[in-house]
Amino acid sequence: MRRSFMKRSLLALCLAVALVSWGVAAEKKEEEHGHEAHHGGCLNAMETCEVGHAETKLEGNTLKLWFVGGGTETGKAVKVSAASITLSVKVDDPKATTQTLTLQPKPNELAEEKVGDCATFEGKADFLNGAKKFNATGEVEFKGKKRKIVIQYPEGYDPD
């Protein structure tokens, strides 16, 4: 009987320590990484993190961009009216020059998106192939206002 009580007490203690550790780790992760990039890319604030983000992900020679919400709403798409988005891109290479990349809308039919009312854009360029790091700038009407796009890949842009 006493052995059973000791086992249950030890199990309860281990569970309590695990729960406390899990909570501390989750809190630390939020402090270190800020908001979550739901598409596996990096978040680039649209002026401030509270306004929204341009999440970017580079796959080979293709740059994918998702406009998402601000604050804790990085999982929510924010549609923009742009028919295309032009970026000035500088790959982190001493020999590289600033290049132009045009992103085209990639409407998500399940979200009832269409060109001119879309949150997802893509652009392809050979100069992106093998790039590990780059900076890019552009402009888009986002949440009713013309805003500058600043991309710092792969770390993300956060002016706050």
Image (tube, helix red, strand yellow):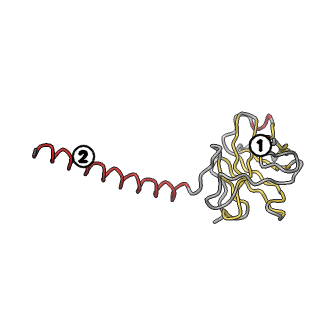
Depth check, front residue: 69 or 46: 69
Q: Residue 116: give x, y in percent of width and height.
A: 88, 50
Residue at 76 percent of width and 47 percent of height: 90
Query: Please, what secondary structure does the residue beneath circle 2 have?
Result: helix
Residue that carries the numbered disc 1 in the rendered image: 96
Q: Residue 160: give x, y in percent of width and height.
A: 63, 66
The residue at the far left in this view is 2
Seen in the picture, residue 52 relative to 12 is either above or below; the reply is below
Mark 2 is surrounded, within 10 Å at the Cα level, by few (under 14), some (14 to 19) or many (20 or more) other residues, namely few
Mark 1 is surrounded, within 10 Å at the Cα level, by few (under 14), some (14 to 19) or many (20 or more) other residues, namely few
Depth check, front residue: 70 or 46: 70
The residue at the far front in this view is 1
Q: Quadrant of residue 157?
A: bottom right
Q: Residue 85: give x, y in percent of width and height.
A: 85, 49
Residue that carries the numbered disc 2 in the rendered image: 11
Lower position in the chain sequence, tag 2 or tag 1? 2
Residue at 69 percent of width and 57 percent of height: 69
Does the image show residue 112? yes
Residue at 76 percent of width and 51 percent of height: 136
Nearer to us of marks 2 and 1 is 2
Query: Please, what secondary structure does the residue beneath circle 1 have?
Result: loop
Q: Amino acid at mark 2?
A: Leu
Q: Amino acid at mark 1?
A: Ala
Instruction: Indicate left or right for 60 with 34 as reference.
Output: right
